[in-house]
Amino acid sequence: MLNPTVVNQFGTIKVDVIKTELLFVPTLKTLAPPPPPMAPVDPAVDHFQCYKAKRSKGTPKFQKSLNVSVQDQFGTGTTTTTVTTSTTTTTVMSPSGAFLETARD
């Protein structure tokens, strides 16, 4: 797939998708061990497909972002990092594997 446009908090960039890299599926998360039994997966919960990607020729270089704050979902800590490049693009998918325009609420 050539030249899809990726828009996120770091700006807009065109990329060339190279290959499938990761699939993220709904999972149980908790800070309290042991976790409770997992309920059946809600079909309205999104799956995410990630692809290895590189900047398309003719597209401006990725602008390094300094002092980006990152916090996990559990609120156990915040760290600051520098984002220097983009190597993966991720899109929301339905459980059947169909692409979705946006994540479902």
Image (spheres, rainbow, N blue to C red):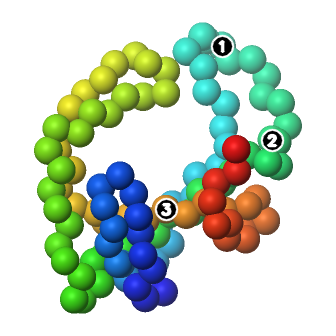
| Left or right of residue 66, residue 16 in this image | right
Residue 78 in the image: x percent, y percent? 30, 23
Q: Which mark is residue 90?
A: 3
Marks 2 and 1, the one that precedes in the sequence: 1
Q: Is residue 11 above or below residue 54?
A: above
Provide the residue designation for mark 2. 41
Q: Amino acid at mark 3?
A: Thr
Quarter of the figure that contains the C terminus? top right
Q: Which residue is mark 1?
A: 34
Q: Residues within 10 Å of mark 1 (few under 14, many from 20)?
A: few
Q: Is residue 78 visible?
A: yes
Labelled pair 2, 3 in contact (Cβ < 8 Å): no
Callout 1 amino acid: Pro
The reply to whether the C-beta atoms of the residues labelled 3 and 1 are less than 8 Å apart is no
Instruction: Name the residue: 41% across, 69% down.
Output: 6
1 to the left or right of 97: left
